Image (cartoon, rainbow, N blue to C red):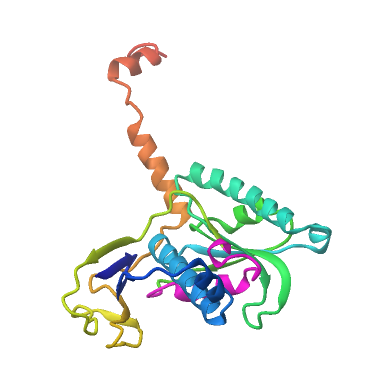
Amino acid sequence: MKRIIRSGNVIEEFYVWKRDVKETRAERRRGASDMRKVAANLKVAQKRLTRVLNENYAEGDLLITLKYRDDALEGKDRAALYHDRELFLRRIRRDLAHMGIEYRTVAVLGVRSSKTGEPARPHHHIVLPRMDYERLRARWEHGSVDYRLLRDDDTYAWLAEYLLKNAPDDIPDAKKYTISRGMRKPQCDEVIARGAGPIVPPSGAKVLHRGEYDRHRAVDYVVYLAPDAKKRVRTPASEVRTAAKKSASKQRPQKTSKQNRAAGGGAGAD
């Protein structure tokens, strides 16, 4: 079988083979401590997070970093840090609902430097829809807020890697990040593979990554930009609010001429 996953403009194709012999529990336990297994798990987590980002975000959306003042951080354990973030996200959810913008967030607790891997001052990374910086700043009362506008990159694989490098290394890779409910899911299809030769992307596709083809094991993995890829740009929050107001005004029932005369005391009333 060949699996095809589309997330946003990015398509992945790879072969999937079912094993005839299942591993025993003892074999799984022995392999769990293998460094290669750890690296493989991280790679899988990065792929899954990349798909979420590619499917749900576009140019103009935000990557923000919530930082702590010294006095706001003192005495807090990890549970308290998560609680601070949850309160912030609740406020943001209400703000977005008021503006008519879909609530979509990916959140990561940062405790390490993405450059060195060394312990760093706790902070929060959050990817969310485009909205006013002043509003974000007002909703975070524990320190400063840094932000970065996302570009229309071919893939947000770089962002997934960056976020996971900041996350704690003492929790499972799949739990290093939190996504909000209702996020759009990538489209996944399986087709019968006639033979197991090298996977050939369609004409006009831009190849982003190609794994090493293994003819003996029938293994191949290709990531490419769909030939029909379209530029993705997020509408600024101010324009979304204006459009929502116009739409609401159009939906209001219009008064008839008789109602207008009645409200004004009749035609010609002073």
Place of residue 44 in the rendered image (x, y in percent of width and height, measured from the top left): 46, 71
**Viewer-side residue, 92 vs 213:** 213
Q: Nearer the viewer, residue 56 or 267?
A: 56
Q: For this view, does 251 lie left or right of residue 123?
A: left
Query: In the rendered image, which quarter is residue 73 located in?
Result: bottom right
Relative to 25, is 134 on the left or the right?
Answer: right
Q: Which x, y percent locates residue 40?
A: 49, 77
Quarter placement of the N terminus: bottom left
Against 68, is 104 above or below? above
| Residue 58 visible to the viewer | no
Q: Residue at x 49, y 58 (%)?
A: 130
Q: Residue at x 41, y 60 (%)?
A: 56
Q: Which residues are magenta?
A: 153-176
Q: Residue at x 63, y 65 (%)?
A: 171
Residue 93 is one of the magenta-drawn residues: no
Along the viewing direction, whichever of 206 and 269 lies nearer the viewer: 206
Residue 176: x and y in percent read 58, 64
Whether 156 is among the magenta residues is yes
Q: Is residue 173 left or right of residue 14?
A: right
The quadrant in which residue 68 appears is: bottom right
